[in-house]
Amino acid sequence: MKPKPNLLEPLLASLLTLDWEISGDSIQKFEEELVALKKRLSDDADSKGLIVLALPVCNYLRVRKGSASPASMQFLHEATRTLHLFQRDKKLGVSARRKVVNSLHSKFQSLLADVQRINSAVVRVTRPKPKAAALPSSPKTAVKTKTKKKTKPPVRRVKKQTATTEVLKVIASHKKGVELAKLRRRTGFADSTIRGILSKAIKEGKVKRISRGVYVAA
């Protein structure tokens, strides 16, 4: 008897691609997988609700890309892990499901607050300064004054900080190597996420394993 296919496998694969690079194509692919999964899990209210929360985060990433808050990717990872839990453990009780969903709702609200702070900061930087009111001049002593050309204030760009970047940065800071457990503590990411990043980085020659569970920058 063949094992049932994992419904979330395409979503997990597209999330790893999005983790590696936040681009229009990677966001579109992940969003398409969410929409397809939403249709297939239409009878699962909790899973459907999590997907509804994740879709606006895709729109946020599409607009902000490199300046997006790291909390946005962390939320997508947690939402995906929860969807995987619901599919793996069909006997999970209603109260246990609700506890997990409520926790993600709380993190989604925190993410919204973070997004609003970023938006406000960008608006403050890019908002043009109000024009000073011109003083009335006497007809007899009117003097022509040179007007200085106004320049727009520079927009402060936030450096892109993906999960992959964070993991590689921690590895680079440990010249003698770093263990998986320490990577998990320093980044806050799940083991599955870190292993996926390490696997790809090793294939690309960016990281090498010097002993069991210990990694160093190549």
Image: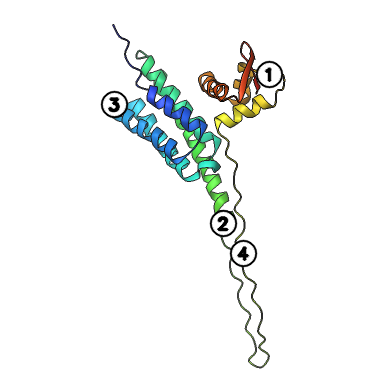
Does residue 127 show up?
yes
From the image, tell me which residue sits under label 2: 126
Residue drawn at x 59%, y 64% is: 129
Three-letter amino acid code of the residue under disc 1: Gly
Q: Earlier in the sequence, mark 3 or mark 4?
A: 3
Does residue 100 show up?
no
Crowd class of label 2 (few under 14; some 14 to 19; many from 20; radius 10 Å): some
From the image, tell me which residue sits under label 4: 151
Q: Earlier in the sequence, mark 3 or mark 2?
A: 3
Mark 2 lies on a secondary structure that is: helix
Q: Tell me if label 3 and label 2 are in contact, CB under 8 Å.
A: no
Q: Tell me if label 3 and label 4 are in contact, CB under 8 Å.
A: no
The CA distance from mark 4 to mark 2 is: 11 Å
On the image, the x and y values in percent for residue 26 come to 44, 35
Quarter of the image with the C terminus is top right
The CA distance from mark 3 to mark 2 is: 43 Å
Seen from the viewer's position, the closer of residues 203 and 175 is: 203
From the image, tell me which residue sits under label 1: 177
The CA distance from mark 1 to mark 4 is: 48 Å
Quarter of the image with the N terminus is top left
Three-letter amino acid code of the residue under disc 4: Thr
Q: Earlier in the sequence, mark 4 or mark 2?
A: 2
